[in-house]
């Protein structure tokens, strides 16, 4: 599955600090549980990537209101 392909899979995401000073992304859904731990610096890089993707998505949403994009 690619980043741009829609899916009917549902999952919950929890984000928080661990007692060991890591940042945990915890994904749970469809009988799976995935804890992913990151150093704080890595978590900040991920946050930057999420913000950049949100900005691009917002820009694409703004242009879609004007009509189809020319290719």
Image: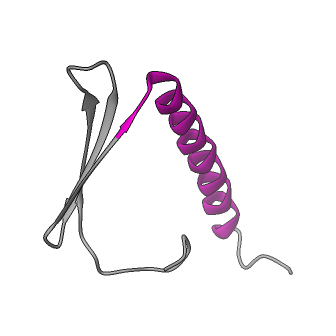
Main SS of the magenta segment? helix
| Front residue (pair 5, 38) | 38
- Residue located at (70% from left, 68% from top): 66
Eyeballing the image, is 14 above or below 61?
above
- Residue located at (57% from left, 33% from top): 45
- Does the magenta portion include 60? yes
Q: Pinpoint residue 19: horizontal percent, then vertical percent.
A: 20, 20
Q: Is residue 31 left or right of residue 12?
A: left
Q: Is residue 11 left or right of residue 37?
A: left
Residue 3 lies in what quarter of the image?
bottom right
- Residue located at (60% from left, 61% from top): 61
Eyeballing the image, is 57 above or below 16?
below
Eyeballing the image, is 44 above or below 13?
above
Q: Is residue 65 left or right of residue 43?
A: right
- Residue located at (85% from left, 79% from top): 70
Which segment is the magenta one? 37-65
Q: Pinpoint residue 39: horizontal percent, then vertical percent.
A: 44, 27
Q: Pinpoint residue 33: horizontal percent, then vertical percent.
A: 19, 58
Residue 9 lies in what quarter of the image?
bottom left
- How many badges with numbers are in the image? 0
């Amino acid at each position: 599955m690619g980043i741009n392909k829609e899916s009917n899979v549902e999952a919950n995401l929890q984000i928080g600090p661990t007692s060991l000073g890591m940042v945990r992304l915890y994904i749970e859904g469809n009988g799976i549980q995935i804890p992913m731990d990151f150093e704080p610096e890595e978590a900040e890089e991920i946050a930057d990537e999420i913000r950049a993707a949100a900005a691009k998505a917002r820009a694409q949403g703004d242009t879609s209101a004007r009509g189809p994009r020319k290719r």
